[in-house]
Image (tube, helix red, strand yellow):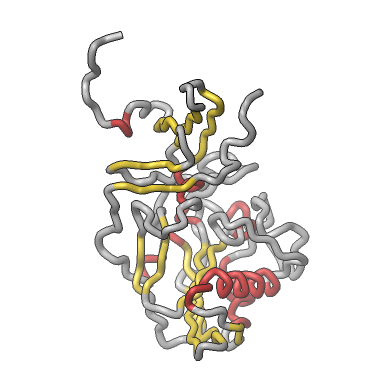
Amino acid sequence: MPDSFKKCNPYARFPGQNFDTYVQAANNLQVWNAELQPRRRYVLIRQDTEGSIQRVKVVTGLSLARLDTTGTLTQKYQARFNAGTEPAELVSPADTAQIRPLLIHGACSKVDALPTDTPTVAELKPIAEIFRELSTLVGRVIPDAGHDQERNRGATLHRLVCSVLGYQSYADDGQFPDIRHQLLEVKLQTGPTIDLGLVQPVSIEPLDLDGLPEGAVRHCDVRYAIFGACTDGRNVTLKNLVLATGEDFFIRFPQFGGRVLNKKLQIPLPRDFFGKPKG
């Protein structure tokens, strides 16, 4: 073993396999001076008090981001929401060429799959059909759970969207996009800032979907349904709808410049993150 090692970028030690390593003696993951990369693999190695390796777990940056409870992710993309003058606006009249082979040909009022299922050939509704169905929600009123319960507002809207799209049951696993079976991300806007998370809508990076070949669907192929709303403190009224592909998203909604960057990101790992120790 050499007396010392040449200094290098600690987040580029395994570029060929696109992963970083972290040795964890406690359930507090610390990422220093680096941004979480959605598609990067993070190898977390769990040691016991004597330094013996007990468990190894590999997750993506997107999975780690969902564990952040502080809301201070290393990077957040944002856009400016403006309602426009139309109650319902279809920015993208057609889907991207990449996903057209997956589209349904003909009417389909009922959907047997779950909203969280991965779409296969002839299961995606065309964006124009989704627009027609979601437009019926404009003017609907939902209970307001309060500013500190934004997720509950979103969950209520999510249920409504699943219903009008013809799903027989509701499901939500908290992953992107919200309604994976239709490659549809749903956002409820009562303010001027659209939070986009770790990935820009226009990204041509592949979207990881079980059951589909890698690269079959990209982030820019996802459809974004943005519902503008107002609240009186008790009820939220859906005032308008804007629907666009990720590819066209920034044509309609200007992106904020810059990014949110922290010097250190601390993520508390759940107690059962590594499962039961060996032995």
Pick out the residue farthest to the front.
49
Percent from the top left, x then y, of residue 178? 57, 61
Tell me: residue 5, above or below residue 57: above
Tell me what residue is drawn at x 35 percent, y 68 percent: 79
Horizontal placement of 159 versus 185: left or right?
A: right
Percent from the top left, x then y, of residue 107? 72, 68
Q: Quadrant of the C terminus?
A: top right
Q: Is residue 20 or residue 243 the one in the foreground?
A: 20
Pick out the residue farthest to the top.
1
Q: Is residue 128 or residue 266 the one in the foreground?
A: 266
Tell me what residue is drawn at x 26 percent, y 31 percent: 9
Numbered circles on residues, count? 0
Tell me: residue 166, above or below residue 182: below
Residue 224 in view in this figure: yes
Q: Quadrant of the N terminus?
A: top left
Tell me: residue 263, above or below residue 11: below
Tell me what residue is drawn at x 74 percent, y 70 percent: 109
Q: Residue 201 falls in which quadrant of the image?
A: bottom left
Tell me what residue is drawn at x 67 percent, y 69 percent: 162
Horizontal placement of 202 versus 237: left or right?
A: left
Q: Is residue 96 or residue 27 the one in the foreground?
A: 27
Horizontal placement of 106 versus 20: left or right?
A: right
Percent from the top left, x then y, of residue 118? 65, 51
Percent from the top left, x then y, of residue 38? 43, 46
Tell me: residue 229, above or below residue 188: below
